[in-house]
Image: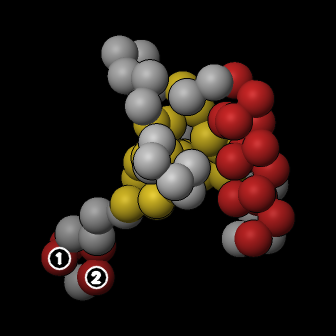
Amino acid sequence: MKPDEIRKLDAYFKKVFQNPKLQVKARPRKDDSAEVYIGDEFLGIVFKDEDDGDYNFSMAILDIDLA
């Protein structure tokens, strides 16, 4: 993703989830997506659908996280 897209997504996530600690970061070896963090904790990946320009956020939830 381009840096301007990442900045827009970062602002969007902070606003929607009302959490200034959320961060959207470029992925080291991929340019089709970005990583979402709260502080140092990884939350998920946001992908861009190149066909329609929409974004998709994917977050895995482990069983142990729900215990």
Crowding near the residue tagged with mark 1, few <14, some 14–19, many ≥20 C-alpha atoms within 10 Å: few
Residue 33: image quadrant is: top left
Look at the image and tell me whether residue 27 can be seen.
yes
Local secondary structure at mark 1:
helix
The residue under label 1 is: 63
- State left or right for residue 15 relative to residue 34: right
Among the 4 quarters of the image, the one containing residue 61 = bottom left
Front residue (pair 59, 5): 5
Residue 66 marker: 2
Q: Could you tell me the amino acid type at mark 1? A: Asp
Q: Is residue 19 above or below residue 46?
A: below
Question: Residue 39, relative to residue 58: is it above or below?
Answer: above
Disc 2 residue type (three-letter): Leu
Determine whether label 1 and label 2 are within 8 Å by CB: yes
User: Given the current orientation, which residue lies at the most extreme top position?
Assistant: 29
Residue 33 in the figure: left or right of residue 10? left
Rendered location of residue 7, percent (x, y): 76, 36
Q: How is the image coloured?
A: secondary structure
What residue is rendered at 69% in x and 36% in y?
5
Residue found at the far front of this picture? 51
In the picture, the quarter occupied by the C terminus is bottom left
How far is disc 1 from disc 2 in space, using C-alphas? Answer: 5 Å
- Residue 39 appears anywhere in the view: no
- The residue lying at 76 percent from left, 29 percent from top is 4
Number of callouts? 2
Indicate the secondary structure of the residue bearing disc 2. Answer: helix
Instruction: Residue at 80% x, 50% y: name it.
Output: 11
Which part of the image, by quadrant, shows the N terminus? top right
**Residue 9, percent from left and from top:** 69, 48
Work out whether residue 1 or residue 40 is closer to the camera in this orientation and state it: 1
Q: Residues within 10 Å of mark 2 (few under 14, many from 20)?
A: few
